[in-house]
Amino acid sequence: MAIPVSRTALPTLAMPTLVGSATVSPTPTPSPTMTDTPTLAPLAGGAPNATASPLPLLISAAPFQDHFLMERPFDPEHTNWVSRNYPYGSTGGGNYRVHHGMDLMNPNGTPVRAVADGTVLYAGPDTDRVFGPEPDFYGNVVVISHDFTTADGQLVFTLYGHLSKVSVQAGQRVDRYDQIGLVGATGVAIGAHLHFEVRVADPYDYGAVRNPDLWIQNFDGFGVLAGRITDAEGNLVEGLALTVSAPGIVRDLATYSEGVWGDDQLEENFAIGDLPEGDYTLILHLGDRKLRQPVTVYRERVNWVEIELP
């Protein structure tokens, strides 16, 4: 089946005056662009940056259908929170190769569940059937072909890597929540965890990945912040360090580095989930300067931001 229309309409303006209530309504007739100028932090050493040019900012609805069609891959008593120190599209601060999925930390032997109905494409070691940049990259791996497609009809697959044991076989039908394996540390894993990927069209293409935060269902009261950060010529900015912060919450991420892709509809170059509904500050780390912009996250939806750098 194709992706259904979003269950909840995106807000047309992501900066409401009220936050944290399920009854907050978007402004009915917003201006297409924000008139407030983002504020730049002082330069290193405390000198104010009085000559910084205003950066055009657009916060609006994107032509996008939410497709939170996947459950979390673990039972509720286990950890379903995504590890945010090495998010999709990042290099972990330059320490690792570009991350093509997300990691969820659980002890060795924890049951791994299928996130949606589908048919097992492959189950076993990724030596004879290579899914990564090299053989035995994911170790024991399960790949599932799902029953839905992207909005433009492309097949959707999920990959579960570094398993200690595989519990299914190729050609087997699975329902969401069915056990497909156990957490392990096979392949190139450092410590026990599940590496989870979403791939589109070609399951064997290491680069055919999409951000799982745009596919996995939100926790109750949580949402996703996504957007595009471009230069003055409209080119996507790669590897730009970002921080999303609110009282008691600090999430570091980066715009996608070369080798991974945004959603086929959104064409975003950053996205982060597991954000409680509310007000945040999006911080762009521009060398010795910091651009700070208020944003709002609504629950159970993708909240969209566009920023053009000079």
Image (cartoon, helix red, strand yellow):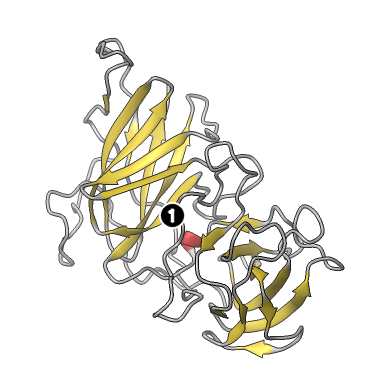
Secondary structure at badge 1 equals loop
Q: Is residue 217 above or below residue 59?
A: below
Q: Is residue 99 above or below residue 177?
A: above
Q: For the residue carrying disc 1, how many other residues have a C-alpha within 10 Å: few (<14), some (14-19), or many (20+)?
A: few
Instruction: Tell me where residue 50 appears, x and y as whole percent.
Output: 25, 11
Q: Amino acid at mark 1?
A: Pro
In which image quadrant can residue 26 be found?
bottom left
Q: Is residue 46 left or right of residue 190?
A: left
- The front one of 261 and 139 is 139
Please say whether residue 156 is visible from this viewpoint: no
Q: Residue at x 52, y 25 (%)?
A: 233
Q: Quadrant of the C terminus?
A: top left
- The front one of 57 and 125 is 125
Instruction: Tell me where residue 102 appears, x and y as whole percent.
Output: 54, 59
- In this view, the residue farthest toward the right is 128
In which image quadrant can residue 165 be found?
bottom right
Q: Residue at x 34, y 35 (%)?
A: 283
Instruction: Tell me where residue 155 appears, x and y as whole percent.
Output: 66, 70
Q: Which residue is mark 1?
A: 63
Q: Quadrant of the N terminus?
A: bottom right
In which image quadrant can residue 109 be found?
bottom right
In this rendering, the count of numbered labels is 1
Please say whether residue 272 is visible from this viewpoint: yes
Q: Is residue 301 left or right of residue 144?
A: left
Instruction: Tell me where residue 41 appears, x and y as whole percent.
Output: 27, 23
